Amino acid sequence: MATETSSGIGDEERQMARTTAIGLGIWLALTIAAVVSLLLFGDAISSLFV
């Protein structure tokens, strides 16, 4: 009975770690995309406001 409870907690922690890893991966991808976009199109974007 104790092993069922501990394995359930392990599965829950594994799921939480997976969700966190996916969230961080998405955040990193969006950050890199924003930096690359600014490097490529920064001059064109800034000319819209000047």
Image (cartoon, helix red, strand yellow):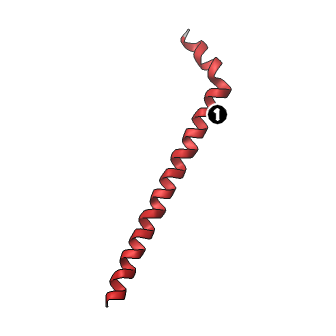
Which residue type does callout 1 highlight? Val
The residue depicted at 48 percent of the width and 52 percent of the height is: 23
Residue 8 vs residue 26: left or right? left
Picture layout, residue 40 above or below residue 21: above
Q: Is residue 13 above or below residue 28?
A: below
Q: Is residue 4 above or below residue 30?
A: below
**Is the residue 9 above or below the residue 19 in the image?**
below
- Badge 1: residue crowd in 10 Å (few <14, some 14–19, many ≥20): few
Is residue 14 rendered to the left or right of residue 29? left
* Picture quarter with the C terminus: top right
Give the residue drawn at x 61%, y 27%.
38
The residue closer to the viewer here, 49 or 18, is 18
Task: Please indicate whether residue 15 sits to the left or right of residue 26 in the image.
Answer: left
**Residue 40 image point, x, y percent:** 68, 27
User: Residue pushed farthest bottom?
Assistant: 1
Give the camera-side residue of 32 and 46.
32
The answer to whether 4 appears left or right of 50 in the picture is left
Residue 15: image quadrant is bottom left
Residue drawn at 54 percent across, 12 percent down? 49
Figure quadrant of residue 31: top right
Q: Secondary structure at mark 1?
A: helix
According to the picture, the residue beneath numbered tag 1 turns out to be 36
Q: Residue at x 53, y 49 (%)?
A: 26
Residue 12 location (% of width, % of height): 39, 71
Looking at the picture, how far across and down is residue 9, in whole percent?
Answer: 36, 75
